[in-house]
Image (spheres, grey):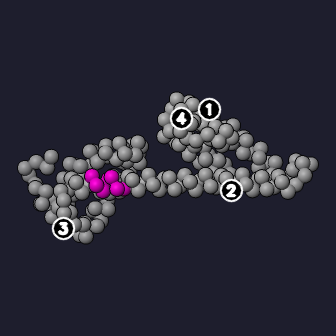
């Protein structure tokens, strides 16, 4: 793939010394295939493109400390792989934190309900909070709302929901994330 114009060793040395022509050739040779590889791992073309762009920027900014012992191609693909896996891990942590925030809201709403009589609840912010929560859930797109309610009310796992609706577990996860994001945004304003 490198062709006869530049060897792997010359490419690696060019990167290390900050040769702009080598960076240009590196980008032209590997940007599109690396983006495709990242898209395959992440299943998200926008995130894949941003991730690969960031990798090229980091290589450019840190060229003097980069030591490529293997082929440049192997180095780039390994970097994309590692960054993609890190992105997925971080996304899972964010999802878990979002779910914890939702549970915290429900927990405090439940506490408020337990601490007041039914008569007082009608006049307090707790009922307003509950109404707002229901309105936000009702405003979700149909599939998103259905998946969210199956998960939260019926306590079905992602896999169970996917099986029941005939969709992938990944779609379920994405829809739950969207619902939680909408809830978070709505309660931020609230």
Nearest to the observer: residue 24 or residue 153: 153
Residue 189 visible in the current orientation = no
Task: For mark 1, give the secondary structure.
Answer: helix
Q: Are marks 3 and 4 in contact (CB under 8 Å)?
A: no
Residue at the right extreme of this rendering: 119
Q: Are marks 2 and 1 in contact (CB under 8 Å)?
A: no
1 left or right of 112 in image: left
108 left or right of 52 in image: right
Q: Which of the two discs, 4 and 1, sits closer to the camera?
A: 4
Along the polypeptide, which appears first: circle 3 or circle 2? 3
Residue 174 % position (x, y): 52, 42
Q: Residues within 10 Å of mark 2 (few under 14, many from 20)?
A: few
Residue 177 visible in the current orientation = yes
Indicate whether residue 56 is drawn in magenta.
no
Along the polypeptide, which appears first: circle 2 or circle 4? 2
Q: Are marks 3 and 2 in contact (CB under 8 Å)?
A: no
The vertical placement of 98 against 131, above or below, is: below
Along the polypeptide, which appears first: circle 2 or circle 1? 2
Q: Residues within 10 Å of mark 4 (few under 14, many from 20)?
A: some
Residue 17 bears which disc, if any?
A: 3
Query: Mark 2 sits on what residue?
Result: 104
Magenta stretch?
Answer: 77-83
Indicate whether residue 81 is drawn in magenta.
yes
Query: Mark 4 sits on what residue?
Result: 162
At x 59%, y 33%, the residue is 143
Main structural element of the magenta stretch: helix, strand or loop? helix
């Amino acid at each position: 793939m490198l062709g006869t114009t530049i060897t792997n060793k010359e490419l690696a040395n060019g990167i290390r010394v900050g040769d702009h022509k080598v960076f240009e050739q590196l980008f032209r040779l590997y940007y599109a295939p690396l983006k495709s590889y990242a898209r395959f791992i992440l299943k998200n073309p926008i995130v894949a493109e941003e991730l690969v762009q960031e990798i090229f920027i980091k290589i450019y900014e840190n060229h003097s400390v980069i030591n490529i012992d293997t082929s440049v191609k192997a180095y780039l693909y390994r970097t994309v792989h590692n960054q993609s896996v890190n992105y997925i891990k971080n996304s899972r942590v964010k999802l878990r934190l979002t779910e914890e925030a939702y549970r915290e809201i429900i927990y405090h709403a439940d506490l408020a309900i337990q601490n007041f009589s039914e008569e007082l609840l009608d006049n307090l912010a707790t009922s307003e909070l509950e109404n707002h929560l229901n309105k936000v859930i009702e405003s979700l797109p149909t599939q998103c709302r259905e998946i969210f309610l199956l998960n939260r009310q019926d306590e079905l796992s992602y896999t169970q929901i996917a099986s029941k609706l005939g969709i992938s577990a990944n779609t379920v996860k994405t829809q739950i994330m969207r619902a939680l994001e909408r809830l978070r945004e709505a309660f931020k304003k609230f």
